[in-house]
Image: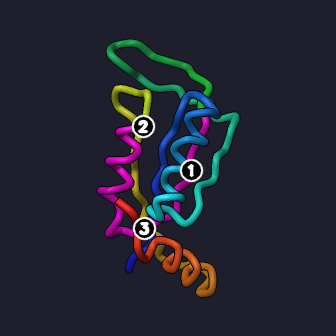
Amino acid sequence: MNEILVLTTVGSAELAGTIARELVEGRLAACVNILPGVRSIYRWQGSVCDEAELLLIIKSAGEHFEKVRAKVRALHSYELPEIIAVDITHGDAAYLDWLRAQVAEPRS
């Protein structure tokens, strides 16, 4: 099992909590960190936007990425949410063992 971090941003604390709980309760994520106070500057539909957002850092397994992506897409309010996975190449062995155990049998 390869461990991953999945990153997404949302516009409200309520939505961040909903996504985090759904992923953890469904065993698609071992843990989700919600970081408030993110400022995102990006180009969207020809305009430069400057928005306050929250960043979700989702700890999961690579083989669950498509299910994580689908769940985030289903719950997200954005037309095109950021959903990016980054491989975890190194980490504390005990923590990574715990992560693997939490996502070993996801619920659909």
Q: What element carries label 2?
A: helix
Quarter of the figure that contains the N terminus: bottom left
- The circle drawn on residue 87 is 3
Q: N-terminal of the two: label 3 or label 1? A: 1
Residue labelled with disc 1: 21
- Magenta stretch: residue 73 in it? yes
Viewer-side residue, 108 vs 99: 108
Mark 2 is on which residue type? Leu
Residue 22, percent from left and from top = 50, 50
Mark 3 is on which residue type? Asp
Residue 15, percent from left and from top = 55, 34
Q: Which residue is drawn at 38% across and 47% down?
A: 71
Q: N-terminal of the two: label 2 or label 3? A: 2
In this rendering, would 9 be left or right of 82?
right
Viewer-side residue, 24 vs 99: 24
Q: Is mark 3 on a helix, strand or loop?
A: strand
Tell me the CA gap for discs 2 and 1: 11 Å
**In this view, 57 is above or below 44:** below
Q: Nearer the viewer, mark 2 or mark 3?
A: 2
Tell me the CA gap for discs 2 and 3: 24 Å
How many marks on residues?
3
- Magenta stretch: residue 103 in it? no
- Give, as a single range, the part of the protein colored magenta: 54-74
Residue labelled with disc 2: 75
Mark 1 is on which residue type? Arg
Residue 89, percent from left and from top = 47, 76
